[in-house]
Every structure is written in structure tokens, then in C-alpha cells.
Image (cartoon, rainbow, N blue to C red):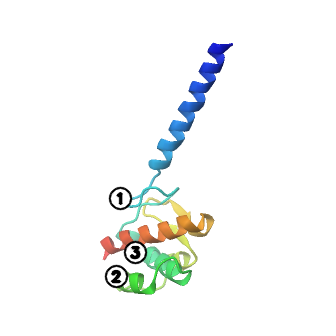
Amino acid sequence: MNARIALLSLCLASAAASAQVDLKKLPGTSGMTGLPGLPSLDSSVSDNVAGTLQYCVKNNYLSADAASGVKDKLMAKVPGQDEDYKKGEQGMLTGSDGKTLDIKSVSSKLRRKACDQVLSSAKSLI
């Protein structure tokens, strides 16, 4: 019986350790780790990133001072406010890898972190 309890304890400890490691290795782009389901971003999704920055500013997750200049520079590279931009404006971040993250679906703290990381990545796209 003690062996079973010890084995069960070991399994639970192992599962807990795995969960902690998984939380630290969630997918994302360089500089964008630590958030669940964060898609990869590159210049092919500049319009969506610009829209997402607009969403973040509108909902006070980023200051306009910090994000508007970056958003404007990204918009100068794309043909206009297309469907991908509009999705970003609604909080739907779509990556070049086809993954999406509905920013509205995560906690407020993670929304702010996601917006910060989108801004950081956006700066490398301009």
C-alpha cells in the first residue's frame, strides 16, 4: 500500500512539474513566449498586427503614444484597412503560421501582456 501511495505521489509530482514546464514553453514568436496560443508574426500579417494594435489602444491595454506610431508605419506598408485589419481591430490576432488568438478570450492581465508583446514584435516589422 505504501508503494502505491509513493507511486501516486510521484505521478502527481511529475504531472505538476510537467504543467509548470509547459506553462513556460507555450508557443509563440521570438519575444512572444508565455501566452497560450500566441501565433507567429511576420510582415505577411502586418495589416492584422496593425488592427490588433488599434484594438489594444482602444481598450486601454496600450497607450496611444506607445502604439500609434508603430501602427501607422505598419499601415503605410499595406494597401488599407482590409479584412485582416478589421479582424485585428476586433481583437483577433492571426499569425503567419495560421494560428489565431482571440485576445478577448484571455484574462485582462494576459490581454495586456499580449498587447505589449504584439507591440514589441510589430516594431521589428517596420
Q: Nearer the viewer, residue 8 or 79?
A: 8
User: Gap between marks 3 and 1, in whole Å?
Assistant: 16 Å
Q: Do callouts 3 and 2 mark residues in contact (Cβ within 8 Å)?
A: yes
Q: Secondary structure at mark 1?
A: loop
For image coordinates 65% across by 17% down, the residue present is 4
Q: Secondary structure at mark 3?
A: helix
Whole-percent x and y of residue 58?
Answer: 54, 84
Nearer-N-terminus badge (3/1)? 1
Q: Do callouts 1 and 2 mark residues in contact (Cβ within 8 Å)?
A: no
Q: Secondary structure at mark 2?
A: loop
Residue behind mark 3: 46
User: Gap between marks 3 and 2, in whole Å?
Assistant: 8 Å
Under mark 3, the amino acid is Ser
Residue behind mark 1: 30
Disc assigned to residue 4: none
Under mark 2, the amino acid is Lys
Q: Please give left or right for residue 106 compared with residue 63 in the image.
A: right
Disc 2 crowd, CA 10 A, few/some/many (<14, 14-19, 20+): few
**Circle nearer the viewer, 1 or 2:** 1
